[in-house]
Image: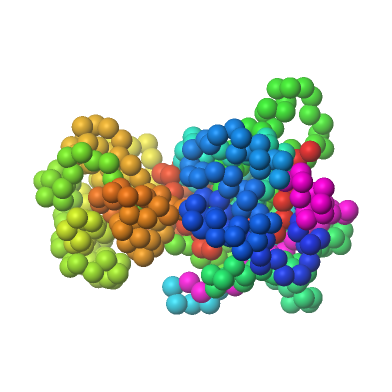
Amino acid sequence: MPAVHPFRAVQFQQGKGDLSAVIAPPYDVLSKTQRDALVAKDPRNIVALDLPHTPAKELGPPEAYARAGDSYRAMLKSGTLARRDKPAIFAYRQTFDFVGKRFERCGMACCTEALAFGPRPGGGILPHEETFSGPKEDRLALMKATRSQLSPIFGIIADEAGTATKLVRGIMQTQPPTATGNMGDGITHEVWTIEDPEIIRNYQKALAAQDIFIADGHHRYNTALNYLKTLEAAGPVAADHPARRIMMVLVGMSDPGLAIGPTHRVLGGMKDYTFDAFKLAAAGLLDITPSGGDLSKIESAMAAAARATTRSVLGLYDFKTRQCYTCTPTADDPLAAMFPAKPKPWRLLDVALAQYLIVERICQPKLNAGNPVKWAFPHSVGEVAEIGSGLETGSGGGTGFAQLAVIVRPTPLDAVRDISRANELMPQKSTFFYPKLATGLFVNPLD
């Protein structure tokens, strides 16, 4: 796999004690209201740097990034943030409840080589979904202003023998954490700082010949590569320059705490949309069945419908009438004609059916005069309802936005691995690995 390195992280409180007041969720799940609430509790909170403007799905004004860069350097000068004297890697545990069960997800924060996406002998960096241009422009402007990588990328390794996972969990069983955090959302964050060269070498050996699958952070990984390119365009960049390494948290597929949730779609901006018009446009492509007016029960209705068919079952919710539906493609392989070269498991993904069958064959050409629809990407039916009420969430939305929700099932982890290894990309926002990594436990300086 790409070489793994310890790094001299920049941290609050020298990476020790309770960091609850200064850590935050990743920038891309936060609304302006949520951001402002974190800063109101503690002006030092990392979100003041990591989310200098909202929404972060597009490039903001230059002065916003300049302020973030100035604030970051002021925090370093005052000692609010400080760089470690010795390089380290960091065992990282998140304890949380998900779908009615308690999980402990354990990984290791470290730096990896800044390599282009794609397979290679000995292991490569493999993306699994497409990305948008706006977030990459925003993140690059912020990285240039702060000359740092403020939040880690979430990577997954196959770890079929479980060696890396056992090593990480073994560390956690033998000593107390050096830092903890809890943002009041039911998720506990614990960090163990590891400077021991032997443990670091053993972890590096455990990852030999492993691919890294990007679970979350495709935009930020691309940003790190683009940042390195800007440096190289200005002149030679040393082989050991910090910008040649990218901070990640790596979790083994064998880790029992690895949980994956859905990323639903809320569609809007369609000038000719009504649900009756949608049903007419979908005739011959989808079989649509009413399932009542309780959005909270739509996933149960989908599960019941799935027991009666071998085809994919998606959920639909019409915001105007507040009615739910289940739908099933009329064909066994409805995307075969559009994507004959794609593997069949890719064509049958719920997210592929949502994008290419529902949006690109029904909504855009028949309900929006061929123009793109507007999207939001909530992770729960509760957030779908919030967007429907006119809220701007971290996943999108806003007043008068929502017309139709497409409810999908979680993308299976095996599909992520197999499709990535086939060097294929899923549609944008195909997966949601729950929970997100915290921002602010460690920062990767690039100068």
Q: Nearer the viewer, residue 82 or 200?
A: 82
Q: Is residue 122 magenta?
A: no
Q: How is the image coloured?
A: rainbow
Residue 186, x across and y down, in percent: 54, 73
Q: In the image, what residue occupies the spot 43% across and 44% down?
A: 428
At a point 66% along the width and 43% down the height, the residue shown is 68
Q: Which residues are magenta?
A: 72-98
Q: Is residue 192 above or below residue 272?
A: below
User: Is residue 220 found left or right of 17 in the rendered image?
Assistant: left
Could you tell whether 21 is left or right of 10 in the image? left
The answer to whether residue 180 is visible is yes
Res. 168 in view? no
Residue 78 is inside the magenta segment: yes
**What x and y, as percent, mark residue 392?**
40, 52
Is residue 440 placed above or below 162 in the rendered structure? Answer: above
Relative vertical location of residue 76 with respect to residue 17 in this rendering, above or below: above
